[in-house]
Amino acid sequence: MHPVILRIGPFSIYSYGVMVALGFGLATALIYKNAARYGIDKSKIIDFAILILFAGIVGARVFYVLSNIDYYIANPFEILNLSKGGLVWYGGFASALLASIWYLKKNSIPFWTFADFIAPYIALAQGLGRIGCFLNGCCFGMEASRPGYPFAVIFPDSHTLRHPTQVHSSLALLFIFIVLRIRQERPHFTGQIFLAYCILYSMKRYILEYLRGDNPILTLGLTVSQVISILVFSISIPLFLYKAFEWKRALLRSK
């Protein structure tokens, strides 16, 4: 693992922060570049990106702290220490979603159109961020029970071979990005790309949680992220089917 990429005197540059920044920067650049194709004013993109960055980090950190509340009650000064990771995607997603709804409504930008546009790039940014998790040694998997498992690695806080769930997640997110970009270039109903992202991501997260070795069980043998994944999936599927039905019905009426 390489949690620190570079040290300059008393200052350290952390791999986790670098990869998160790289993912966010690349996604923002691609969104900015392609905004005009979707009828979106480029001048709104930078303001939106800054808002989402702030809202996402705050929400992700708050969710992580609440998920590990006993530790942070005993170590309150660690709450603002992000050098070792400590962000939960669903927390960031929820806060960023609320901030997005407010910003888009304020600027008269259709939510579903914009959400469809940026959904693939969200997956891309996440995929790069997960590489940061791997380099940092956080979000690791459980011990590899199968002898000779070729992809197992030893993380700094463990002396046993573990599943590199961060890499699995990164590859899955790259796959989601490719699928969504291909679908984005073809005829689709409003909300299809964003809802497909929610469905695919929740499935990915639910499955990989069984290989995670750092998340406590909440209830019924499920982690917090698995419970949230079930909720996201359960909401997204009916919405997806309803919008698909309405789209097909509209196409039939137009013939």
Image: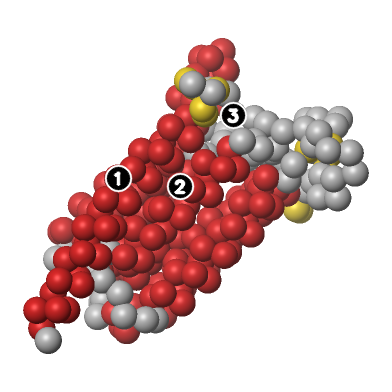
In the image, taking residue 226 as reference, residue 99 lies left or right, namely left
**Residue type at the position of mark 2:** Ser
Mark 3 secondary-structure assignment: loop
Residue at image x 64%, y 59%?
Answer: 171
Mark-to-mark CA distance, 1 and 2: 11 Å
Residue at image x 39%, y 53%?
Answer: 198
**Residue type at the position of mark 3:** Asn
Q: Quadrant of the C terminus?
A: bottom left
Q: Which residue is mark 3?
A: 215
Q: Which residue is mark 2?
A: 202
Observer-nearest of 14 and 168: 168
Observer-nearest of 160 and 108: 160
In the image, taking residue 245 as reference, residue 212 lies left or right, namely right
Whether residue 111 is visible, yes or no, is no
Mark-to-mark CA distance, 3 and 2: 16 Å
> Tag 1: Cα neighbours inside 10 Å, few (<14), some, or many (≥20)?
some
Q: Disc 3, disc 1: CB below 8 Å?
A: no
Marked residue nearer the N-terminal end (3 or 1): 3
**Residue type at the position of mark 1:** Ile
From the top left corner, tell me how far across and down residue 199 is, in percent: 41, 53
Quarter of the view holding residue 158: top right
Query: Closer to the observer: label 3 or label 2?
Result: 2
Residue at image x 78%, y 48%?
Answer: 2
Q: Which residue is mark 1?
A: 235
Observer-nearest of 124 and 233: 233
Whether residue 196 is visible, yes or no, is yes
In the image, taking residue 209 as reference, residue 164 lies left or right, namely right
